[in-house]
Amino acid sequence: MAQNSSAGNPNSGASRREFLCTLGGIAGCAGLLPVATGCVTNLPGEFSDVKVKAAAGGTFEFKLSDPKFADLATVGKVVGVDAKPGLPIVLIRASTADIFAFSGLCPHANLQLAQLGAFDPATLQLTCLHQNSIFDKNGNVVSGPSPKGLTAYAVTFANGEGKVSL
Ligand code: FES
């Protein structure tokens, strides 16, 4: 069963994210960092909170009616998914029509984007707030220290239900 371990825990992923978003916003206002404007504040407390067993063919399905994925009802929200052992991914509600799926570790220092990623629906860019690696909607590096892009996975999404092909 999915648990939101962030509830009431000041050291939770959500709290860390809120802190980083606040820090990023302050730095952005000061012109110090190219931070995303759509900072995400409602994420799973820990990356492994959402566990989904991928099918043998390398796919998994999700429904927004499932509380584990309810955040994806809101454009800009991100949900971390542990679909297979060693394969964390992030699902992002990019627009009313689209959900993106990317590999969940930023290649710069292998940190978890479910906790450090901020998605901007206006630019369709994902920023890793560690040192501001920015990725486009295809997972390509736009700027920052990441030596390579993210793997983008195909997602079909309609009527509140989706499928990710890994
Ligand atoms: S781990 Fe993402 S920028 Fe460093």
Image (cartoon, grey):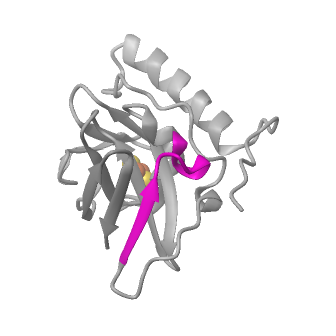
Is 30 displayed left or right of 34 in the figure? right
Identify whether 28 is placed above or below 59.
above
Image location of residue 40, percent across then percent down: 47, 32
Q: What is the x, y in percent for residue 42?
A: 57, 34
- Residue 152 position within the rendered picture, expressed as x and y whole percent measured from the top left: 24, 61
Dividing the image into 4 quarters, which one contains the C terminus? bottom left
**In this orientation, which residue lies closer to the viewer: 48 or 57?**
57
**Which residue of the protein is positioned furthest toward the bottom in this rendering?**
56
Q: Residue at x 75, y 41 (%)?
A: 11
> In the image, which residues are magenta?
59-70
Identify the residue at the far top of this view: 29
Note whether 75 is above or below 132 in the view shown.
above
Answer left or right for 79 relative to 149. Answer: right
Q: Residue furthest right?
A: 8
Name the residue nearer the viewer: 55 or 159: 159
Residue drawn at x 26%, y 65% as measured from the top left = 151
- Residue sitting at 37 percent across and 31 percent down? 75
Say whether residue 157 is visible. yes
Residue at 53 percent of width and 80 percent of height: 85
Q: Is residue 64 magenta?
A: yes
Q: Which image quarter: residue 125?
A: top left
Examine the structure image and report whether residue 86 is included in the region drawn in magenta.
Answer: no
Name of the residue lying farthest toward the front: 159
